[in-house]
Image: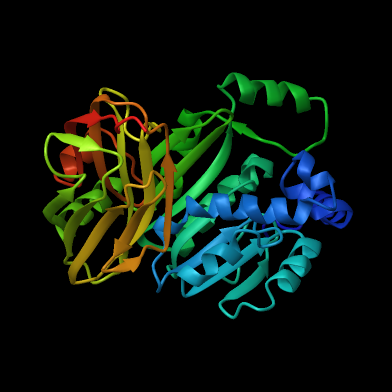
């Protein structure tokens, strides 16, 4: 018999989260002042969910089977459910799961499983296309968290990805939080990147990227080999043509003029895939993605075994930069427009990012044509 299964520690963990959910489930999930105000908490909770879900959309396609480990009230399941075939919410708290079932009763492609605190029992081997865990593993005892890593590898399809969040011990914010709770019983665990990489590798999960935030480590890992995953994507998906008109043509540009840029990609993959998209104009020399004159990010599903057209339409009104996929609005597209009065040396960045990767030297080398930077001169609009 597994001595860890059904232990007193796990019973205490379940009791803790059941109690916290019964008191204020919103606050138990998101420690935020807005969650304390009954008049604001529901709207703020849903808005935070939509914001966090945007960073997960590019991992999904219509046939995806997805697992949300530590789903709580299912806050991320609602915005993600329309973009996948099925999403399974897993949690240790019966109270949380009861609330999630009530909140998502209108959705037909969601289901829920209660975990024992270290397993994904009820999820079949090799059946999951994408698994994510946010605001969950930070609260899990390290031994149980490692058991979860083994379980994540078990349920993921070969080459499938996961997105995981951990507390970073080595940032000032992370270490300050560690010192703040070290004399309490509040469940928080802290890691170093080296420790995480060791445990992930032992579990058969290979990081595609590890991002460091103010106090968190965000890991995107693949079941199997990250290098093999990148090689397969580079082989199967190619960027075949780029066409620009109006604002996007020539060495100079005006932000009060409409324009259109078209990128065509061909996928030889039998499995539906997605790209994250980025187009921006920034002062020359600024890192890609830094808000300058404008920035648009979106999610683009690719046609398996066929061509996909991505068209960026800029209205010239200083407010709209729309992404269309094969003539239809992208599943998610957001635009930031900065000060339009400026001008001078600038760069036009166009990035097509395989899900889980970011604009860096490896991406530029491995996926030629997927990310481009073009020097331009930005003309200030006429006065008046």
State the quadrant of the N terminus.
Answer: bottom right
Q: Is residue 88 left or right of residue 6?
A: left
The quarter of the displayed image where residue 49 is located: bottom right
Residue 179 or residue 317, whichever sits in front: 317
**Residue 139's x, y, as percent?**
69, 43
Residue at image coords 57%, 38%: 166
Residue at image coords 42%, 47%: 319
**Residue 211's x, y, as percent?**
45, 35
Residue at image coords 84%, 47%: 37
**Residue 314's x, y, as percent?**
30, 50
Residue 273 or residue 323, whichever sits in front: 323
Q: Is residue 240 above or below residue 190?
A: below
Q: Is residue 187 above or below residue 275?
A: above
Counting every numbered tag in the picture gives 0
Q: Is residue 203 visible?
A: yes
Residue 301 or residue 99, whichever sits in front: 301
**Residue 66's x, y, as percent?**
49, 65
Q: Is residue 207 visible?
A: no
Q: Is residue 36 left or right of residue 380?
A: right
State the quadrant of the C terminus.
Answer: top left
Q: Is residue 121 left or right of residue 114?
A: left
Color scheme of the displayed model = rainbow
Q: Residue furthest front?
A: 384
Residue 239 or residue 67, whichever sits in front: 239
Q: Is residue 88 above or below residue 59?
A: below
């Amino acid at each position: 018999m597994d001595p860890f299964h059904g232990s007193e520690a796990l019973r205490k963990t379940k009791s803790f989260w059941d109690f916290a959910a019964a008191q204020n489930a919103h606050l138990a999930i998101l420690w935020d002042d807005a969650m304390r105000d009954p008049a604001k908490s529901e709207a703020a909770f849903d808005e935070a969910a939509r914001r966090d879900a945007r960073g997960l959309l590019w991992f999904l396609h219509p046939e995806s089977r997805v697992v949300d480990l530590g789903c709580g009230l299912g806050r991320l399941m609602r915005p993600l459910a329309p973009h996948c075939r099925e999403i399974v919410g897993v949690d240790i708290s019966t109270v949380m799961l009861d609330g999630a079932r009530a909140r998502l009763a209108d959705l037909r492609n969601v289901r829920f499983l209660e975990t024992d605190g270290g397993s994904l029992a009820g999820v079949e081997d090799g059946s999951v296309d994408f698994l994510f865990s946010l605001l969950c593993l930070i609260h899990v005892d390290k031994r149980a968290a490692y058991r979860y890593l083994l379980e994540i590898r078990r349920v993921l399809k070969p080459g499938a990805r996961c997105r995981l969040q951990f507390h970073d011990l080595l940032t000032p914010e992370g270490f300050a939080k560690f010192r703040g709770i070290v004399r309490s019983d509040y469940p928080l665990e802290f890691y170093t990147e080296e420790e995480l990489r060791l445990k992930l590798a032992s579990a058969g999960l290979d990081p595609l990227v590890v991002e460091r935030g103010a106090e968190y480590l965000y890991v995107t890992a693949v079941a199997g080999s990250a290098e093999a995953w990148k090689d397969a994507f580079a082989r199967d998906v190619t960027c075949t043509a780029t066409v620009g008109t109006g604002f996007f043509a020539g060495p100079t540009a005006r932000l009060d003029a409409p324009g259109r840029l078209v990128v065509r990609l061909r996928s030889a993959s039998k499995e539906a895939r997605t790209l994250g998209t980025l187009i921006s104009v920034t002062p020359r020399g600024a890192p890609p993605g830094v808000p300058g004159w404008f920035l648009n990010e979106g999610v683009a599903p690719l046609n398996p075994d066929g061509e996909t057209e991505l068209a960026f339409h800029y209205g010239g009104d200083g407010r709209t930069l729309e992404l269309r996929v094969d003539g239809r609005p992208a599943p998610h597209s957001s635009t930031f427009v900065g000060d339009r009065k400026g001008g001078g040396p600038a760069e036009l960045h166009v990035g097509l990012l395989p899900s889980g990767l970011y604009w860096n030297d490896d991406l530029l080398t491995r996926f030629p044509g997927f990310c481009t930077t073009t020097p331009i001169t930005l003309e200030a609009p006429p006065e008046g």
